[in-house]
Amino acid sequence: MADFVLPAPATAAPKLPATESKRTSLGQYYPHRKWQLMLSLMVAMSLGLTFLFCGGCAIGSEDFLVTFGYNFFYTTGLWLANGFPSEWLNRRVDWTVQPIKRFLATLGLSLVLSFLVILAVTESFLVFYHHRPLSSLAWRPFVVPLLITVVVSLFMHSRSFLMGWRDAAIQTERLQKENAQAQADSLRRQLDPHFLFNSLNALTSLVEENDPARASRFIRQLSQVYRYVLDSQDQEVVPLGEEMRFVESYVFLQRTRLGEGVQVEISLPPTAALEALLVPPLAVQLLLENALKHNATSQRDPLHITIELDATARQLLVRNALRPRRLAEGESTGLGLTNLRARYAFLTKQPLAVEKTATEFIVTLPVLALE
């Protein structure tokens, strides 16, 4: 069953996401460019430090090259010691979910790995260049570079934390806005004058046919449809049982208008079993409306629509036969399924699935549950 959760913070030719920085996009889609960029940066930084600390050295002299080697191995090693652990932690400990744990893990890894890099570089030059024994290694020179490394590392990780927090806030706000727009769009379409106009025409026909029993039932069902639409407009999810009772009323109105031109088969467990399952309000109705809007109906060749619950996968399948018809200009906006996807993205990580075959159009709705 799909979990009812807020989304946290997705192959053809790579397309750079608009919400990510150019640096992140290059690193994600073109890793060799990231390495080239960082290597160039390390060389430039090392040269700058060499000119700073060995200003009197002739370029190309032994002192100049040794100083450059120190700086290059220090800067590159410390970058690797802080960069890769940060990426590794990003996949396992989210700043926005466990900030204290992430801070402590960042600080611990930064200290340990930076110390190992400084120790390795110092020992290597001590043994292989100065030809001194390891016993001559002094611990005092490690303190200052280690403290500088920790300060710089904490600054970089603090920036990463703030950027991640900002992106999460923007993502949540965007999804909330999309959900509100989708719900408002569903409401506007349901209260569309054409739907009411067609329903009143069907009611007029029942009155003219002198069929008070069916006319009375039609009025009750029409009232239930609009009451449900108004009552559910502020709800993110509703019990599947309520949604299906609304669907039955909606189907009755459409069958009264279209007669035998549409056949709807609903295969679901008893109503009591549906009350624990949740779907976005008007989700099933939207799919029925799309099926009726985009397909032709006739008494001789009725449009078949099936609604069934896959108990194993906990998914609701809505399928209809394909009888495409030409739509008048402005009759369809093409936003129905897009808005429904946005509503599901706000509620669960399990996506809405759409499949089109030669004879059928099938939409699979995840069934939600509070856990």
Image (spheres, rainbow, N blue to C red):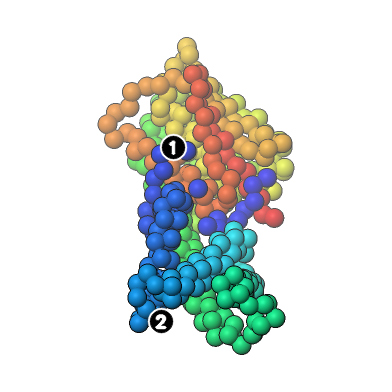
Question: Label 1 is placed on what type of residue?
Answer: Ala
Residue pushed farthest left? Answer: 329
CA gap between label 2 and label 1 equals 49 Å
Q: Residue at x 55, y 85 (%)?
A: 144
Among numbered discs 2 and 1, the one appearing first in the sequence: 1
* 63, 237: nearer the viewer: 63
Question: Label 2 is placed on what type of residue?
Answer: Phe
* 125, 204: nearer the viewer: 125
The quadrant in which residue 364 appears is: top right
Q: Position of residue 170 (x, y in %)?
A: 44, 63
Disc 1: which residue? 12
The quadrant in which residue 24 appears is: bottom left
Disc 2: which residue? 53
Residue pushed farthest top? Answer: 300
Q: Is residue 135 above or below residue 27?
A: below
Q: Residue at x 72, y 43 (%)?
A: 272
Q: Is disc 1 placed on a helix, strand or loop?
A: loop
Q: Position of residue 184 (x, y in %)?
A: 41, 51
Specify whether residue 156 is in view.
no
* 17, 362: nearer the viewer: 17
Q: Position of residue 279 (x, y in %)?
A: 58, 46
Q: Position of residue 276 (x, y in %)?
A: 69, 48
Mark 2–mark 1 contact, CB under 8 Å?
Answer: no
Q: Is residue 87 above or below residue 188?
A: below
The quadrant in which residue 132 appears is: bottom right
Q: Residue at x 54, y 40 (%)?
A: 352
